[in-house]
Amino acid sequence: QLQLVESGGGLVQPGGSLRLSCTATGFSLDHYALGWFRQAPGKEREGVSCISVRGGSTAYADSVKGRFTISRDHAKGTVYLQMNNLKPEDTGVYYCAGYYDSSYYYTPPPCLHRDYGMDYWGKGTLVTVSS
């Protein structure tokens, strides 16, 4: 079965950190650009961060700049989202999505601007920031 799988979510206090991981089953992420999205209760899904296929180009939503870092390890076939200084408003289900498009080898995909056009989505991992 071809799918993306997120992990690493959980309950953390404000100011804490979590690292999310996104891996693929049934295929390789080597040629996919990736985006992380989140959906808070009662809100629309929003793009959080995106990374190019080669990993050298990234983009972040203003709300997470300076706190979140997206990266990828091709050897491990994994894309990460390091989240520091977490706030209650970061609470939500976090999803990763993959884009198979040569346009994104050196440019991040437009995950901050739209949440369609992806080839694969994961089922999400819940992040809860609460004291």
Image: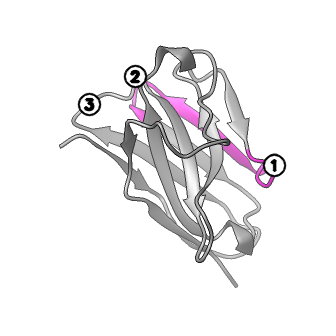
**Residue 78 at x, y = what percent?**
43, 36
Q: What span is in magenta?
A: 61-78
Query: Where is mark 1, residue-wise?
Result: 62
Which amino acid is tagged 2?
A: Asp
Q: CA distance from mark 1 to mark 2?
A: 27 Å
**Residue 1 at x, y = what percent?**
17, 43
Tag 1 secondary structure: loop
Quadrant of the rendering where the C terminus is positioned: bottom right
Q: CA distance from mark 2 to mark 3?
A: 9 Å
Residue under the point 59% across and 30% down: 109
**Residue 97 at x, y = what percent?**
46, 43
Query: Dot 2: few (<14), some (14–19), or many (≥20) neighbours within 10 Å?
Result: some
> Would you say the residues marked 3 and 1 are in contact, meaning their CB atoms lie under 8 Å apart?
no
Residue under the point 43% across and 59% down: 124
Which amino acid is tagged 1?
A: Asp
Furthest toward the left, the residue is 1
Q: Image height check: is 119 above or below 101? A: below
Tag 3 secondary structure: loop
Q: Image height check: is 33 above or below 62? A: above
- Identify the image quadrant of residue 74: top left
Query: Where is mark 2, residue-wise?
Result: 30
The colour scheme used here is: one colour
Residue under the point 48% across and 47% down: 96
